[in-house]
Structure formats: structure tokens, C-alpha cells
Amino acid sequence: MKPVIKLGGSVLVDSTLRLKLVFQISELRRQAINTVLVHGGGKQIAEMLSRLKIESRFHDGLRITDAAARDVIQMVLAGKVGKDLVADLARLNVSAVSFAGGDAMSFLSTKLKAEDGTDLGFVGQIARTDGKLIDAILSINAVPVIACLALSAHDFSYHNINGDQMAAAVAPACAADELIFVTDVGGVKDEKGETISHLNRERINALLESGVAHGGMRPKLRACLSALDAGVKRILIIGAAEENSLLRACLEQESVGTVIS
């Protein structure tokens, strides 16, 4: 079994949730499950941008990224967030290696424009993948911890990649069985605010077209569609606060949060 687990920055800033999630990841590794982590860091990026007096701007759930913001994102994601996760896992005697998508040219990207044509700056979409570095890290019984950055296939500058889209590219690159998004919302909500237990492609498109899916859920659902297109069989969107949600989803194959297939 090989799950790709995407940890959002919002769950990583909560120390209690973070420790619970890292413990569950360590338990998966001890069960000889080849776990691959992809992490965001939106709140950590926003805090650093604020400290540096750089404005945070968003469009359709995506961060508009000028050169100054791109450099901060590279520093926060490939530096502090990823290395902190490596240290957290080491405390539980689990080896991990953090890297960004540009390392070993594992993930190359092209410039992404919003659906309405808005220029998002140094925001990319994954165009080419190479899973050899992930496989090499797994081969030494370590956990790959991947930051959401890629190199431009055009000029090899760094692009900021939406974390959910990054996870959707990582999963097929390493032939993952499952893609699991760990969030602070616990699943996809319908128009009444209730969690939807199962989704398919048609229902996802309906949620996007109607506007029921809004904010950060929009790129997440688009990422789910990309992962389905790439052959990922099972996708889950689960809550970080729910007791042992990762272990239940992976080990017991329990339906937690929203299951997409």
C-alpha cells in the first residue's frame, strides 16, 4: 500500500493536531506502509509575508505570487515547514527526507492562469513528473516530505504550486494507491453545510459550477479531478481533528470524511 497524504498548512499550525497527525503517520510507517507526504503552508506563508510587509492576494482560491512573495514561499515551504516535519518524525524514530519539487527535476511546471485569464504571477501547474527521487527515498525506508514548489520547464525559475494540485501530481508520479487530503473542515460540504460522504466526477463538476464549492475547496476539487484523470482510484478528504482519521482511512479502509472515486 502506498498512500500520498497532503497536509494543509492550517492543520500544521495547530500543535495538538500536528502531533496527533505525525503520530498516525509514524504508525503507518511502522506498518510498512510506504507513506508519501505533501505539505502546504498557507498560514505560515501569510504570517511571514505580513512580517515582511508584503501583501497577500488571492484569486479563485489561489495565491497571486509576485517575485517577492515567491521567494518567501520558497523559504517557508522548502525550509522551515518541511524541515520541522522531518524533526517531528525523527522524534518518533521515523526517518524522513524533505525536498521541493525542483529537486532532481522531479516536478516541472508551466505558468498557470486563472480560468478568467487573471495573471497569477509565479504560479505554476505541473507539466512533467519523475518519481525516481521519491522511489529512492522510500527504498531506504524513509518518508518523502515534499514541498509545493516546482521548476519552470521554460526557464527553471521556481513556481508556487497549489498544494492540492501538487498532491494530485505526486500520487500518479509514485503510483500511489490512495490520495488523502487532511484538512480542518473534515470533508466536502453541500449547500446545507453538511458533509458529503461520497462524490463522483459529475457531482464535483456540479459543486464547482453552482458555486457551492468556494474558496480553497475549489482548487482542491479540481485537484481531485486531475488525480482521477491520472488513474488514482481512491481519494479521501478527511478532518484532522477526527480521532485516528488517517489510521482508519488507511489501515481499516473506513469511509471517513468524503470519499471520491
Image (tube, rainbow, N blue to C red):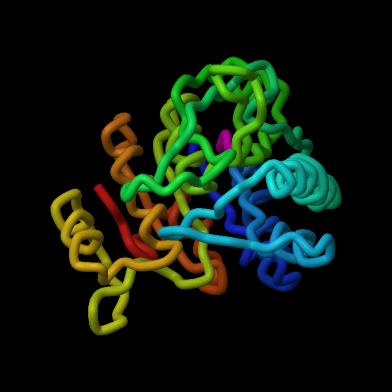
Q: Position of residue 38 (x, y in %)?
A: 59, 43
Of all residues, the one furthest to the front in this rendering is 118
Q: Residue at x 46, y 50 (%)?
A: 180
Q: In the picture provided, is 116 more to the left or to the right than 79? A: left
User: Is the magenta region chiefly helix, strand or loop?
Assistant: loop
Q: How many marks?
A: 0
Q: Position of residue 58 (x, y in %)?
A: 52, 60
Q: Residue at x 47, y 20 (%)?
A: 128
Q: Position of residue 198 (x, y in %)?
A: 24, 61
The answer to whether 64 is drawn above or below residue 166 in the figure is: below
Assess whether residue 65 is covered by the magenta stretch. Answer: no
Is 88 or 140 nearer to us in this picture? 88
Assess whether residue 34 is covered by the magenta stretch. Answer: yes
**Magenta extent:** 32-36
Q: Residue at x 23, y 79 (%)?
A: 191
Is 81 or 257 nearer to us in this picture? 81
The answer to whether 62 is drawn above or below residue 104 in the figure is: below
Q: In the picture provided, is 89 more to the left or to the right than 30? A: right
Is 113 or 23 nearer to us in this picture? 113
Q: Quadrant of residue 259?
A: bottom left
Q: Position of residue 223 (x, y in %)?
A: 38, 45
The answer to whether 208 is drawn above or below residue 29 in the figure is: below
Q: Residue at x 46, y 42 (%)?
A: 165
